[in-house]
Image (tube, rainbow, N blue to C red):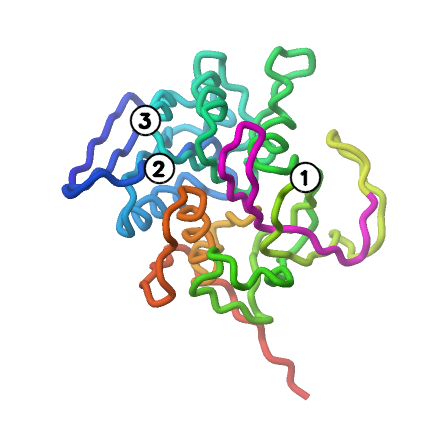
Amino acid sequence: MTKKLLFLSFFVCTLSFLHGEKPHAVFVVGTHHYSPQKSMPMLASEIERLGFKTTVINPEWDPEKDERGLPSLEALKKADLAIFYTRFLKIDDQQLVHITDYLKSGKPVVGFRTSTHGFNYPDEHPNQKWNDGFGRDALGSPYLIHLSGPTRLKVEQGRKKHPVFTGVQADENWESRGTLYLTKMENGTTPLLLGTGHPRDKKAAVRTNRFGTHHLKPEMTDVVAWTWTNKWGGRTFSTSLGHLNDFGDPNSVRLIINGIFWAADQKVPSADTKINTFGAPPSKKKKKTK
């Protein structure tokens, strides 16, 4: 295995294999919100161990807040799969075109958590359409609003045999520390994982943000992971998982890795394949005493 590092106040880490051509996954880390600058390189190392070649575009600065944005996106030209963890980007046309060209190629896409609101161009800006369009057209849902507190997770009815659940031992204690994102699924999406959460005060409320007006209930359930064929024909796995603690949970990590393999049209790892976690483990629920 060889590793090539390119440093120009940012780094791109390319990991290749000695034997045979492996699917090439390019990670695009476009925020420091929820610390993907830490989790995505570790996830890349894990899927590399399982059979991928990976490149991680991960600047030392926060691309969401720094006008330098995301150099080295030209790596997407050689990608077989693009994995996005982005938020509220305003990258220039020279950088954005690498993403749009990739999407228009019809190649597969994986999107994490804040990627549903991956761009934040000003009103009247020529690229403003990507503010909602990336989530809607590339991933299958735009961002609406998020709730409060942890999210209880369960498999959508009838989906347990989907390949992404291979080796996943789902039970009533499966939980994400991340808040529940509400979705607006595009036609043709396949919901796989559901989450249940609540507003901050656990009361019904009407909330308005720049994404619209939302009628919230004391408890709400929505889709947390789904598959889709996107606008350009790309095979897509998307999830609002991505809180740093999710990567310490064996079920969540296995689901994520299976989703990556599924999107790349690769056979998912068998149920007995060892999958490493690399984040803080989720806190255990205390049993109620009578």
The spot of residue 54 in percent (x, y) is 30, 38
Q: Which mark is residue 94?
A: none
The quadrant the N terminus occupies is top left
Q: Which SS type dominates the magenta stretch?
A: strand
Q: Mark 3 points at which residue?
A: 78
Using the numbered discs, state the Cα–Cα distance from disc 2 to disc 3 in whole angstroms. 9 Å
Q: What residue type is labelled 2?
A: Ala
Say whether residue 206 is left or right of residue 60: right
- Secondary structure at numbered mark 1: loop
Residue located at (22% from left, 30% from top): 5
**In this rendering, which labeled residue sits more in front, label 2 or label 1?**
1
Q: Name the residue under label 1.
A: 187
Say whether residue 261 is left or right of residue 33: left
Residue located at (56% from left, 57% from top): 176
Q: Which amino acid does label 1 sit on?
A: Asn
* Nearer-N-terminus badge (2/1): 2
Magenta range is 215-239
* Residue 76 vertical position relative to residue 248 in the rendered view, above or below: above
The spot of residue 182 in percent (x, y) is 69, 45
Q: What residue type is labelled 3?
A: Lys
Using the numbered discs, state the Cα–Cα distance from disc 1 to disc 3 in whole angstroms. 30 Å
Q: Mark 2 points at which residue?
A: 25
Residue located at (66% from left, 37% from top): 143
Determine crowd level at label 1: few under 14, some 14-19, many 20+ residues with C-alpha closer than 10 A: few
